[in-house]
Amino acid sequence: MNYAYIMVHYGELSTKGGNKKLFINCLNRNIRHALSVDFPEAKVTSDRDHTYVEVGDYDVNDLVVRLQDVSGIQRITPVVKVEKDMKVIDETALELIKEEDGTSFKVKAKRADKQFPLDSFGIMREVSAHILRNHKLDVDLHNPEITLTVDIRDTHACISCHTYKGCGGYPLGMNGKAMMLLSGGIDSPVASYLLIRRGIKIETLHFAAPPYTSDAVIDKLTDIIKKLNVYQEDIKLNIVPFTELQLAIYEHVDEPYCITIMRRMMMRIATAVAKDHNCHGLATGESVGQVASQTLESMIAINDVTNYPIIRPLATVDKNDCIDIAKKIDTYEISIRPYEDCCTIFTPKKPKTKPRIKDCEWYESKWDWQSQVEACIKGVKSTFIKNGEIIYDGTNQEEN
Ligand code: ATP
Ligand code: MG
């Protein structure tokens, strides 16, 4: 028997009361986008508590795998939809469970329709008894090999032997847009993915310092963004010409403070570009303690120049766990390609781990960095990458 529908269980949406409709519409839109390339005929509908995807002629497992990348989905259950008649439910359940391998089973029942003559326990007992009478299986309530679910909805019943984990979080777009500072390393693509999963759309911003950094880094960033397109179909890459300001920093600032001042400049520029592009937060791939400049004291000095929230999704994530996620989202191999980041080229031997804001301000009083920051903001070049294709390239942003 073929599963004709996939039932999508909402993640944290269900806690959102009045906003629920908005959330469901947003999720359904994202599901349609996600399916549009490989499954253009798959119909998406919803009732009060679930979204359904019609399987049609597609492979149900392929659809499940694609849906597992859509944020805001808690669980994915391929189902057979039948009328709310216990005879039909019994027969369908028996037919489905006969197709499964395994020697033990358990029935789980739920009813949204409280008028249904049997309650959950009654449904579970009746369906279990029917299976036991007609098929050679044992009941195991604690560790069954097969779990059959019966869900009585308002207009129909859904029956299934399989359920899969979704990636959780919120539908993309529900939680605004952030400007993600993207380097060519391992961490910032992972941080990007975690933001997207939380329902936050991203634009990306990269500080390039040619000729000290090579153009190859732009190809690398483009390749990373193409991978992230699986989770957000269109992502903008903004490139800041950072060389002059960076050289000025190394001319005017003592070595231990260079990284802190550089990051303060980055945040000033990022805030201005973010405002201009309608983003309501900044984000980085920083992790507390990972390098000398990523201490809480450093973060005070860096945060001091912006009133935008700086989201650091990896703040408490171990490098190994971060690498696991990078492999899962397929950015790891791209990130480990050799490259020079503006941060690594100018890395001081002994960066200050506890920089003081007063000292930062003293260094920053030594030259007219304001006009250089202005020039960086004006010089931003934007590229738009959609579903793995570069849409426009190299010009100053026309559409934010
Ligand atoms: P990553 O692996 O993401 O490069 P990292 O561990 O190498 O991170 P740093 O190089 O210290 O750490 O950078 C910390 C964060 O600062 C990065 O995750 C990124 O968000 C931001 N960043 C660093 N360099 C750049 C850059 N050239 N352009 C934009 N953002 C940058
Ligand atoms: Mg880096």
Image (spheres, rainbow, N blue to C red):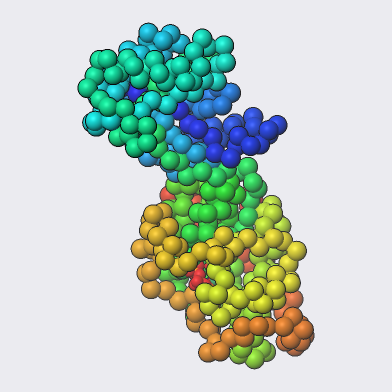
Position of the N terminus, as image quadrant, is: top left
Percent x, y of residue 390: 47, 52
Q: Is 68 rendered above or below residue 216?
A: above
Percent x, y of residue 200: 60, 49
Residue 137 appearing in the image? yes
Between 221 and 198, the one lying in front of the other is 198
Between 111 and 211, the one lying in front of the other is 111
Report whether 358 appears left or right of 109.
Answer: right
Residue shown at 62% from the left, 86% from the top: 352
Percent x, y of residue 278: 69, 52
Residue shown at 59% from the left, 32% from the top: 24
Residue 56 appearing in the image? no
Q: Is 128 rendered above or below residue 185?
A: above
| Image quadrant in which you'd find residue 13 | top right
Q: Is 279 rendered above or below residue 162?
A: below
Residue shown at 77% from the left, 84% from the top: 358
Residue shown at 39% from the left, 34% from the top: 163
